[in-house]
Image: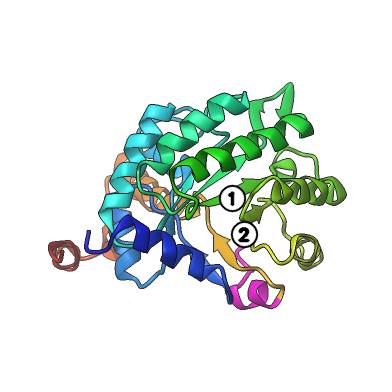
């Protein structure tokens, strides 16, 4: 690393001041270093991409696993890193605070806490508890380094509760509880996205790409500050790997290798400090 953690955090905050930037999601050191090489200005971890790389389903890794993963990703590049910290690996605000403090200790420039419980019988935390969890995360960050950004996620659109009014009310409450950036993954229409941006202004809004037809320019025009791709890059990589392996197993041919990256190019890129 050639820049300090403090510099990374300062750079990350400045990115949110104006314009719109893409926050791609690597799942290991190699993908992180490639994204840095490609010219992106910041990165974000992906809970699903990381879980798949370890042979597990999303939301089936432990807090200890994620802390180690964040430490590795943060050390892999000089870019600021935003942590997908799922639901904080605890139900109660006190537990969330303890785990958030650990995450801040990995050197991340930001982290997200969602209101999804991971339980089918009650997909979302009760609203009052969800706000207390965000408030606890904010306090934990401030006790270590207030420069770290807190992103609050409302998961209603991903759990079947596609209620924009309730989503906006939750995001507004999260902002009042200390969130620096608001995020409702699953929003897909310009009207819904614009409504969220307006409701939480001047705080920045993060949008997840859920349709390939979305563009950076169109989202920027709606006032979106940052764009995430979640596990999409990992899924693209898995699709290529799975397709090639399936061809070998079922047909005994290797034509998928024709589109492979060149070893010399990869070695040359990763040989650089």
Near-viewer residue (169 or 73): 169
Which residue is rendered at x = 69% and y = 45% of the image? 177
Residue position for label 1:
151
Answer whether residue 129 is magenta in the image. Answer: no
Relative to 1, does residue 154 appear above or below in the rendering?
above
- Magenta region: 207-221
Q: Which mark is residue 265?
A: none
User: Which quarter of the rendering shows the C terminus?
Assistant: bottom left
How packed mark 2 is, by other alpha carbons closer than 10 Å (few <14, some 14-19, many 20 or more), is many
Q: Is residue 224 left or right of residue 150?
A: right
Which residue is rendered at x = 69% and y = 33% of the image? 132
**Number of numbered markers:** 2
Near-viewer residue (54 or 132): 132
- The answer to whether any part of residue 42 appears in the image is no
Answer whether residue 219 is magenta in the image. Answer: yes
Residue 142, percent from left and from top = 51, 45
- Gap between marks 1 and 2, in whole Å? 9 Å
Q: Helix or strand or loop: what does disc 1 sit on?
A: strand
Q: Are dots 1 and 2 in contact, CB under 8 Å? A: yes
Residue 268, percent from left and from top = 14, 67
Near-viewer residue (247 or 2): 2
Residue position for label 2:
206
Q: Residue furthest top?
A: 121
Q: How is the image coloured?
A: rainbow
Q: Is residue 212 left or right of residue 103?
A: right
Which residue is rendered at x = 72% and y = 29% of the image? 129
How packed mark 1 is, by other alpha carbons closer than 10 Å (few <14, some 14-19, many 20 or more), is many
Relative to 218, does residue 22 appear above or below in the rendering?
above
Q: Helix or strand or loop: what does disc 2 sit on?
A: strand
Mark in front: 1 vs 2 = 1
Residue 218, percent from left and from top = 66, 76
Q: Earlier in the sequence, mark 1 or mark 2?
A: 1
């Amino acid at each position: 690393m050639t820049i300090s953690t403090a510099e990374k955090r300062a750079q990350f905050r400045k990115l949110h001041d104006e314009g719109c930037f893409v926050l791609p999601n690597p799942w290991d050191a190699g993908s992180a270093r490639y994204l840095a090489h490609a010219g992106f200005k910041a990165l974000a971890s992906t809970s699903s991409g990381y879980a798949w790389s370890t042979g597990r389903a999303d939301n089936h890794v432990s807090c200890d696993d994620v802390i180690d993963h964040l430490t590795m990703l943060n050390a892999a590049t000089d870019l600021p890193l935003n942590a997908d910290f799922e639901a904080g690996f605890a139900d109660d605000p006190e537990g969330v605070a303890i785990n958030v403090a650990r995450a801040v200790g990995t050197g991340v420039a930001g982290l997200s806490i969602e209101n999804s419980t991971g339980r089918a019988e009650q997909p979302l935390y009760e609203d009052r508890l969800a706000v207390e969890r965000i408030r606890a995360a904010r306090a934990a960050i401030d006790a270590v380094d207030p420069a770290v950004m807190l992103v609050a996620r409302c998961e209603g659109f991903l759990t079947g509760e596609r209620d924009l009014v309730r989503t906006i009310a939750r995001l507004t409450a999260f902002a009042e509880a200390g969130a620096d950036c608001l995020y409702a993954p699953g929003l897909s229409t310009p009207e819904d996205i614009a409504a969220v941006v307006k409701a939480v202004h001047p705080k920045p809004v993060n949008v997840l790409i859920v349709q390939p037809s979305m563009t950076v320019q169109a989202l920027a025009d709606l006032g979106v500050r940052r764009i995430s791709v979640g596990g999409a890059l990992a899924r693209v990589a898995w699709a290529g790997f799975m397709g090639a392996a399936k061809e070998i197993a079922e047909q005994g041919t290797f034509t998928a290798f024709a589109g492979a990256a060149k070893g010399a190019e990869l070695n040359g890129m990763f040989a650089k400090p």
